[in-house]
Image: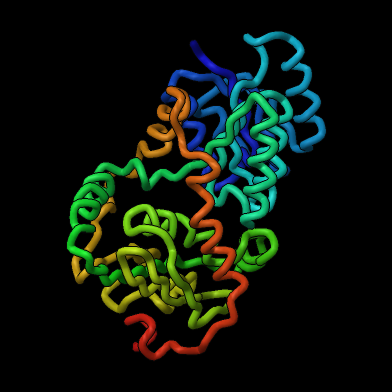
Amino acid sequence: MSKNFAITGAAGYVAPRHLKAIKDTGNTLVAAADPSDSVGILDRYFQHVAFFTEFERFDRHIEKLRRMGDDKRVHYVSICSPNYLHDAHVRFALRIGADAICEKPLVLNPWNVDALAELESESEGKINTVLQLRVHPSLIALKKKLDNEKRLGRKHEVVLTYITSRGNWYLVSWKGQLERSGGLATNIGIHFFDMLIWLFGPVQGSEVHHADPHKTCGFIELENARVKWFLSIDRDDLPAEVDQTQQTTFRSITYDGSEIEFSGGFTDLHTEIYRDVLSGGGFGLEDARPSIELAQGIRKATPTGKTADSHPFLKK
């Protein structure tokens, strides 16, 4: 049976992946909200979507639908709004009796997870988050391989490098505001931190070597790996071999010198997440907690300044 969806952050970068997932799973988008009215993308997937630039009017409309019966009410709220609004919009979903499907990071701080857990236990709704790398076929195969290797009792050496060029607009937008985005480690790093914790086990220690608005790096000790990580939005950090007229992003994750290859297969990962949620599965609060705790710790840490041996890219 088709379910009714609403979406917040409809004009955002990640919203089209959610719109496609809603469409591909045979469901219907009935309402959308975003302060920006640049949401023509909606027409590619759905017609007759009630759209609001003011959340209060969106709230009123959803409440009206709730009182019109199960075939009219919103069953799921997809949350693609800026990071600092995720907590409030998840709460909104629970209040109207819907399930939430929230982009990463689910929230900015571990204590927000605790508060949402209480609300979830008191409501009929369920909180889901999008950890799409966990459903990537090549990463699932790698996890099985690594789980078998745990018996060897040794730690893997991991190097994470993610450089994604961003212009001056980035620091002016909410993404460049620490209190709204959570900083680089949260906004662009949490995808990879969750993946590494999932693959290599719980965090045992962490330190930050360098942090500024454009780049940050450090070291993480996981149960089964030692991780050197580097995140940057500075175009000048791109490797010399990268043709910057064709490529503005460089991503590399290696373990024991071998590249973890997952460049392909991204097209339908959000759709796979939605299928899982709709079938009663999905990733919840406790799945999201470890990477949120790690990212918050990185955000609050005082950089040690120990960059000489922290990451190959800092030796250039």
Which residue is at 58% across, 47% downward? 106
Residue in the foreground of this view, choosing between 13 and 77: 77
Q: Residue 265 is drawn in which quadrant? A: top left
Residue in the foreground of this view, choosing between 266 and 260: 260
Give x and y (percent) for residue 138: 24, 47
Q: Residue 273 is drawn in which quadrant? A: top left
* Residue 236 in view here: yes
Q: Quadrant of the C terminus?
A: bottom left
Report the side of 178 relative to 210 (left or right).
right
Report the side of 47 relative to 249 (left or right).
right
Residue in the foreground of this view, choosing between 256 and 243: 256
Q: Is residue 185 above or below residue 31?
A: below
Give x and y (percent) for residue 49: 64, 23
Which residue is at 57% across, 40% downward? 102
Which residue is at 41% across, 68% downward? 163
Residue in the foreground of this view, choosing between 180 and 233: 180
Q: Is residue 157 above or below residue 3?
A: below
Which residue is at 52% across, 45% downward? 286
Give x and y (percent) for residue 304: 52, 86
Report the side of 151 relative to 275 (left or right).
left
How many dots with numbers? 0
Give x and y (percent) for residue 80: 59, 42
Q: Is residue 60 above or below residue 120?
A: above
* Residue 38 in view here: no
Q: Residue 253 is drawn in which quadrant? A: bottom left
Q: Is residue 288 above or below residue 173?
A: above
Colour mode of the rendering: rainbow
